[in-house]
Image: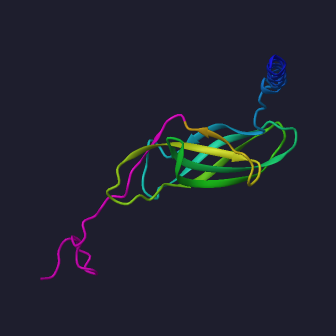
């Protein structure tokens, strides 16, 4: 009984010692990363508002690579709205390249509550590859569409709003 216990303990110690150096290996930095990010929408994003997202993507690898970029609005780690995407054809090895994403604000139905979201831009080298993301420093406020009351407009074709024929 004692031999079995000692053999079991020695196996556990050997297995733990073998996993130690592998677990302590430093993590490698991602080859592509968004190093700078800026939104030109301001503090509020209106419904279907068009704006630009600019930034810089850096290639830490030695080889040139393309960069697939995507911009989204997130809340508590979940993606709520996809704003736009851009494909940077070639980023030379150990160099950076500026990018611009043409984004469109989300079209929320009238009566939806105003909410704050985080602007996040992710980059990856190809489809299906793991992406590296960067958040904007400040959150943005997404404003829903304003509701117009139906039936309050003028008669079609008259050009005078609010006056209708009896």
Q: Is residue 97 left or right of residue 83?
A: right
Q: 165 and 133: which one is in front?
A: 133
Residue 155's spot in the image, x, y percent?
23, 79
Residue 12, given in percent of the width and then of the height, sits at: 79, 23
- The answer to which quarter of the image holds residue 77 is top right
Q: Position of residue 4 (x, y in %)?
A: 82, 22
Query: In terms of depth relative to the viewer, which is nearer, 131 or 139?
Result: 131
Quarter occupied by the N terminus: top right
Image position of 82 (left or right of 59): left
Q: Is residue 82 located in the magenta-colored stretch of the structure?
A: no
Nearer-the-camera pick, 92 or 14: 14
> In terms of image quadrants, where is residue 17?
top right
Q: Position of residue 141 (x, y in %)?
A: 42, 44
**Residue drawn at point x = 76 percent, y = 52 percent:** 126
- Front-most of 96 and 127? 127
Residue positioned most to the left: 166
User: Chief secondary structure of the magenta span?
Assistant: loop
Segment tinted magenta in the rendering: 137-166
Which residue is situated farthest in the right direction here? 63
User: Is residue 157 shown left or right of residue 56?
Assistant: left
The image quadrant where one finds the C terminus is bottom left
């Amino acid at each position: 009984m004692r031999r079995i216990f000692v053999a079991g303990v020695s196996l556990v110690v050997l297995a733990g010692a073998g996993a130690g150096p592998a677990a302590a290996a430093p993590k490698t930095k991602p080859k592509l990363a968004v190093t700078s990010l800026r939104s030109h929408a301001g503090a509020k994003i209106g419904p279907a508002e068009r704006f630009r997202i600019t930034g810089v993507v850096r290639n830490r690898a030695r080889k040139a690579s393309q960069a697939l970029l995507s911009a989204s609005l997130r809340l508590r780690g979940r993606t709520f709205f996809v704003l736009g995407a851009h494909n940077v054809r070639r980023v030379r090895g150990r160099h950076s390249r500026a990018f611009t994403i043409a984004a469109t604000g989300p079209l929320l139905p009238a009566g939806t509550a105003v909410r704050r979201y985080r602007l996040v831009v992710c980059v990856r080298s190809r489809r299906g590859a793991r992406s590296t993301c960067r958040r904007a420093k400040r959150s943005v406020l997404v404003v829903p569409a304003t509701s117009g009351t139906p039936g309050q407009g003028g008669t079609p074709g008259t050009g005078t709003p609010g006056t209708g024929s009896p």
